[in-house]
Image (spheres, grey):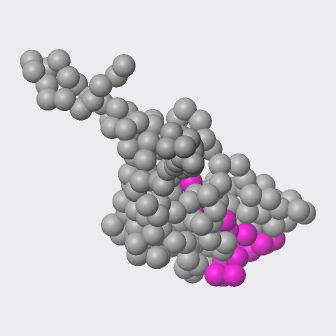
Amino acid sequence: MLSSFFDSTNHDRLYSSADFAAYFKQFIGNGVFYNPSSSLQVAADSGLTVKVNVGSCFINGYCGRMTAAETVTLSEGGAADRYDLITARLDFVARDIHIEVIEGDAAEEAAYPELVRNASFYDIALAAVKVPKNAISISQADITDTRFDTALCGIVTGVVDTIDTSELFAQYQAEIGR
């Protein structure tokens, strides 16, 4: 059994960030911390730029915090509509969490591109931005907020999940003879 976290005596207890992440992801789920409600919200800026608001997120045991809004520039529209995902990316190579754009494919029936979730990267989608055919600007109507979609992002609403006590209660009831 692995044990943690104990004081080190002569460097016999050394813990890595992965040890702490494994601990925290047991009770904090992935997503955006929703205080303030505009945390990491994506908004149209000017031309083909969008702005990601300040805020914090939690991804697989790691925390990211933006203290200044970040502007992201998208590629011009092509021969057909496409969707780009604005993500917060947990990057094990760079050892950080940063804003990333996953550019979709232009298509008659445009679809969201796939999130990257592998051994090196784990994305949560903050927004899907429709880049219309031949677009040179983005409007707020082109932006779909995906922070509330638990499959794409999610909201960190409580630090500890509620546990299902129905089995425990059934055992208790059986024990007292009800």
The correct choice, above or below, for 142 with respect to 105 in the image is below
Q: Nearer the viewer, residue 1 or 85?
A: 1
Report whether 37 appears left or right of 109.
left
**Where does the N terminus fall, quadrant-wise?**
top left
Report whether 116 appears left or right of 22.
right
Report whether 6 appears left or right of 54.
left
Report whether 119 appears left or right of 114.
left
Q: Could you say which quadrant of the image residue 65 lies in?
A: bottom left
Q: Magenta segment, which residues?
A: 122-142
Residue visible at 64% across and 81% down in the picture: 140
- Residue 15: give x, y in percent of width and height: 26, 29
Residue visible at 46% across and 76% down in the picture: 37
Residue visible at 74% across and 58% down in the picture: 112
Whether the magenta-drawn stretch holds residue 131 is answered as yes
Q: Nearer the viewer, residue 113 or 133?
A: 113
Marker count (numbered):
0
